[in-house]
Amino acid sequence: MSGKQDLKDLSLNELEDFISTFGLKPYRAKQIFKWLFQKHAHSIDSMTDLSKDIRKELSKNCYVGHLTLKRMDQSKDNSKKFLFETSDNNGIESVLIPERNHWTLCISTQIGCPMKCKFCYTGEKGLLRNLSVSEILNQVGTVLKIGEFKEKLPNIVIMGMGEPLSNYDNTVKSIQTLLSQWGFNFSHRKVTVSTVGLVPQMNQLAKDLPVNLAISLNAPNNKIRNRIMPINKKFPVEELIITAKNYPISKRKRITFEYILIKDINDSDENAYELAEILKGFPCKINLIPFNEHHATIFKQPDEDRITKFRAILLKKKFTAPIRRSKGSDIAAACGQLGKSIG
Ligand code: SF4
């Protein structure tokens, strides 16, 4: 579609500006937004409350982007992994995770990832490219179009392939459309952005959007974090924790820290005490995620006894620390495994 504008790449304000060049009033942008994100229109021609002349004019200059759903794998635990193909023949994966009464959809923001966390398959090959706003949103739109998920999909986690805050502008613009009442109309309480801790972007996000924040911490000190997450050399643990503590969040919400437990790397009693110390007095949640083994790393998952002991220390220190077992590991859909089906 060279030279044409993908309508899904535009925010509502940008769409208003864009269509004003064709003499269309701002309320038309809301109409078009609804067609794009609530009625999942596949083409401008199907937007039947626009006159034929308007549709013809718009079709000359813009189009409705979509992703091709290449495959859906189903896990033994009922998780589903979607493989989408982009117009330049790249692959994007998203994962639908079953919770007790609803689904959570984990979406991607990049193809590959520049962060190169040592425990993660996605980061192994580095970054291929950022996803566009349309590509980020079409993961949600395509899954919602599959009728069975429509009613029970209140939660979106922006965590899949890539570091969302390193594709900052497109991630923020996508979230604005997720939250817009004319767009997907998700509640801001139901959208979570996960980050390895890009401090300047975290500070900016705090000003831009009222969404939940999850920080992929995975270590209680710089020595361990430097070893498994290269980004720590730029934004060390102390700076990250101070940024998290200053993050403006409503009293009813808490920041989540993700802590992937890796055998003999970050899972000792001493590590648990150190973690409790650096988060002391901070009303947060610590998700303990036993590492998902994969062929690209020598890291192993701790045994059950070690996981239980690590957690017991955090509970004794009065932290909320659930064990979150990644779902979908049999279809390479678990945390840190995305990208395997793409090759
Ligand atoms: S864990 Fe997340 S940020 Fe780190 S390399 Fe993997 S996808 Fe990127």
Image (cartoon, grey):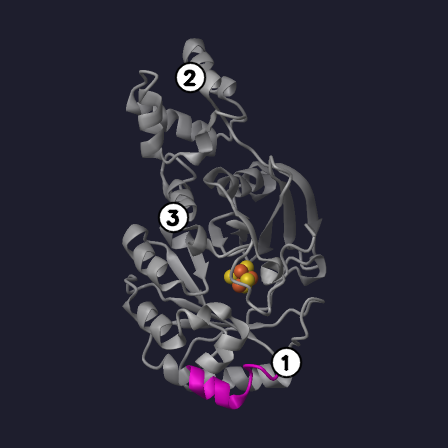
Task: Answer with left or right where residue 14 lies relative to residue 9.
Answer: left
In percent of width and height, residue 180 lies at: 36, 40
In percent of width and height, residue 189 lies at: 38, 54
Residue 15 vs residue 198, the one in the foreground: 198
In percent of width and height, residue 97 lies at: 58, 55
User: Quarter of the image containing the N terminus?
Assistant: top right
On the image, numbered disc 2 is attached to which residue?
49
Q: CA gap, disc 2 to disc 3?
A: 27 Å
The three-letter amino acid code for the residue at tag 1 is Pro
Q: Earlier in the sequence, mark 1 or mark 2?
A: 2
Q: Earlier in the sequence, mark 2 or mark 3?
A: 2
Residue 285 vs residue 61, the one in the foreground: 61
Task: Answer with left or right where residue 105 lies relative to residue 302.
Answer: left
Outermost residue toward the top? 53
Residue 315 appears anywhere in the view:
no
Q: Is residue 69 magenta?
A: no
Instruction: Give the extent of the magenta segment.
Output: 263-275
Q: CA gap, disc 1 to disc 3?
A: 37 Å
The three-letter amino acid code for the residue at tag 2 is Asp
On the image, numbered disc 3 is attached to which residue?
187
Q: Which mark is in front, 1 or 2?
A: 1
The three-letter amino acid code for the residue at tag 3 is Ser
On the image, numbered disc 1 is attached to which residue?
302
- The residue at 46%/54% (across/down) is 164
| Vertical side of 288 occupied by 147: above or below | above
